[in-house]
Structure formats: C-alpha cells, structure tokens
Amino acid sequence: MIEVVSLHPRAPDPAVLARAGALLREGELVAFPSETVYGLGADATSERAVRRIYEAKGRPERNPVIVHVAAAEEARDLSADWPEVAARLADAFWPGPLTVVVRRGPSVPDAVTAGRATVGFRCPSHPVAMGLIRAAGRPLAAPSANRSFSVSPTRAEHVVRSFGLMEDSAAPTNRARVSLVLDAGPASGGIESTVIDVTGAVPRILRPGLVTLAELRQVIGTVEAPGIMLRPDDGVSALPAPGMLERHYATRARIELAPLDGSAEVRGWLDQGRMVGWMTWAAAEEIESPRVRRIDIPTDPREFAALLYDAMIRLDDQGVDRIVVAALPLEEDWMGIRDRLARASVSA
Ligand code: TXA
Ligand code: MG
C-alpha cells in the first residue's frame, strides 16, 4: 500500500514536508492537497520524473501538465514571455485556483508541455502545497491525482484508492509508484482551477473552474470562453484545453442531466428496478424509496463544487445504477460545475 502521512492543513509539520521534498528531488511522485483537488506531484525540471506521472495516471501523452510554483517570479523565469496580462492575473489571483498558460521557456521539459510551445502555471494557496514546493526547492508538475478520465480526488482516500493497489495489479511497473500521499483532509474548493491562455490577443478560458469569468473580467476586461462544454450535446468540436477529452470525470454509474428537477427520471429508473443517485434542489419533492440516494444541491455553486466529486464517488460506492442530476442554473458562476457534469455524462 501507499504510505499516507497526515498533516495539519494550515500548520504542516516541516519535517514531513522536508522528507516529501527530498523524495521529489529524487524523482519520486508525491500526492498532496491543494485548494482545488489533490495533485500528483513530480519535479517539473526533470523529464524522467514527469514521465512517471503519465505512467501512473495512464495519461494520454498529448495532455500537458500544470507547473506549480511558489511565486509569480518563478513562473516568469520559466516562460519565454510573461505578458502584462499574466502579471495582472498573478497579482490578483495568486496564490489561488487560476492556471495561466504562457509561452514556455527553454528549460521546461517536453513532458510537461506535451511538446507544445506553451506551459500552464499555477501558484496554489494551500499551505501544504505551498510548503511542499518550497521544501522541494523546485517547481512541481502536478495533474489531479486520479487515473485519467476518472473523477478527480478531493480526499486522500480517493488518491489511495486510485493508486494504492497499483503495485499488485494495474501497475505497469513500480517506476510509476506513488511514494507518499500527504493527507490534510478534504480539499476545500472541490473542482479544479480555471485555466486561461494569455498567449493570444484576447485571453481565452480553456477550462472553467473556481475563479469565475466575472472575477477575471474585473481584472483584465474581455475574456473569451469558446468551446466550453455546458451540456453533453454541446459536443467538443472546439476542444478547449488539450486533454479535456470528451468523456472525463467519469463515474461507473451513468450520469443523466435532467431538464427539470429529475423526479420523473428517478421514478422511471425506480420502475425499472434500478437504484438511483439523485442530486436535486432542496425544494424538489420527496421520493420515498430505499433505492434512492438523494443529495441536495446547495444554492451557492462554491458549496456544490466542494462536495460534488466526493458525492459522485460515494454514490458509485453505494452501487447506484444511475446518477440523475437536476437542471443547474445558467449563470456563469455555475460554468465550472456544468462543464464537469456535462463531461461526466457523455456516454463512453
Ligand atoms: O486545480 C488544478 O488545476 C489541479 C491541481 C492539482 O492544481 N490540477 C489539475 O491538473 O487539474 P490536470 O492535469 O488534471 O488538468 C490540467 C488541465 C488540462 O486540461 C490541461 O490540458 C490544461 O490544464 N493545460 C495544462 N497545460 C496546458 C497548456 N500548456 N496549454 C493548454 N492547456 C494546458
Ligand atoms: Mg485532471
């Protein structure tokens, strides 16, 4: 099994961080909490270490990984070009859940960028993530700490379940081992960072996330959000971020996005003898059945984001056949959540 060490989320033990940092410098993989989801970290300056991430995750080679830095200057130094808009975004949102894509500098390994001319940077606000970058003394390449295409982890247990058994079964080799999981309790944000590309004339959202469009506009004015998936039938003809492949964040149970509160769909599945997970508004009627697992959707999108992945994983664990989700508000603040659920509901 993987080694898991518990840390205080705000005052992590420096000795543990020092040990984790040393493992990273040796080219090992260390999973850690951030303010969005748990990440799977590797030394971003080492081609070999970053390749291990792809192997451990079963990640498609063309999907670049985010580089986590402790300060904006580190990102600037690793870039070919650090435009004014990147500086303004970093000023306003770092440390925090925003990834800024700029042109890569020569010292960034190919494995990080998947061979592209750009690289995404994020300076995380979680004290454990920040402490780990500092302890490693290197920028850290880190995707979400899940196997590719499945739900991102918001708890250390989720990470252990994805990678814990790898040594015995799915593991291609122990080169892809996760050496250590730092457990600081649930990741509070719950969905991933917003990814914004500032290499063009107008900044473009590649992935909606915890920082909203309104917040971005306040700081940099016009922002484009082309090709963001808000319904499964939106399709992905204009694939935003490379690797935001059609089916993503997938649960074992199929996810169905209902046009209203979902009660009709839930009754339909119950009639067919199925067990159903139901994410719906608090105001929706009660459906009395031992085969319904209901989760009320909070009115604040940030609260829903915080519980969404954990709820999806728990419903899967409970063995539901379907997960019915009520229609979500069209407001921009819900964009990140709607994008994730749309992708999760695309059939395989
Ligand atoms: O909140 C987060 O961003 C988490 C935590 C751990 O920081 N990380 C995360 O990484 O979600 P990952 O690998 O699961 O998703 C990274 C996304 C992908 O959609 C990837 O295509 C995009 O960022 N991305 C990374 N570098 C890019 C680049 N150079 N150009 C375009 N998109 C990029
Ligand atoms: Mg991911």
Image: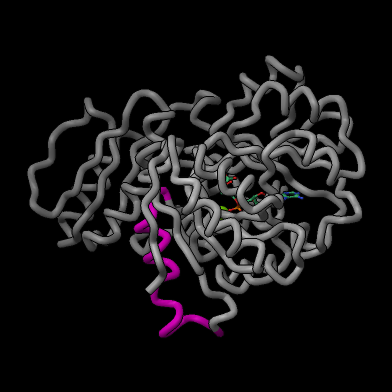
Q: Nearer the viewer, residue 97 or 3?
A: 3
Which residue corresponds to the image point at 76% horizontal and 67% vertical from the top-left? 47
What residue span does the magenta drawing correspond to? 154-173
x, y percentage for residue 304? 38, 34
Q: Is residue 7 above or below residue 56?
A: above
Which residue corresponds to the image point at 33% horizontal and 34% vertical from the top-left? 260
Q: Is residue 208 above or below residue 269?
A: above
**344 displayed left or right of 244:** left
**242 displayed left or right of 297:** right
**335 displayed left or right of 244:** left
Q: Nearer the viewer, residue 327 or 85?
A: 85
Q: Is residue 284 visible?
A: yes
Q: Is residue 177 above or below residue 273?
A: below
Which residue corresponds to the image point at 72% horizontal and 43% vertical from the top-left? 121
Using the rendered view, name the quadrant where residue 24 is placed.
bottom right
Q: Which residue lies most toward the top here?
A: 218
Using the rendered view, name the quadrant where residue 103 is placed.
top right
The question of residue 300 being in magenta is answered with no
x, y percentage for residue 91? 72, 23
Q: Quadrant of the N terminus?
A: bottom left
Q: Nearer the viewer, residue 25 or 282?
A: 25
Q: Main secondary structure of the magenta part?
A: loop
x, y percentage for residue 296? 25, 34
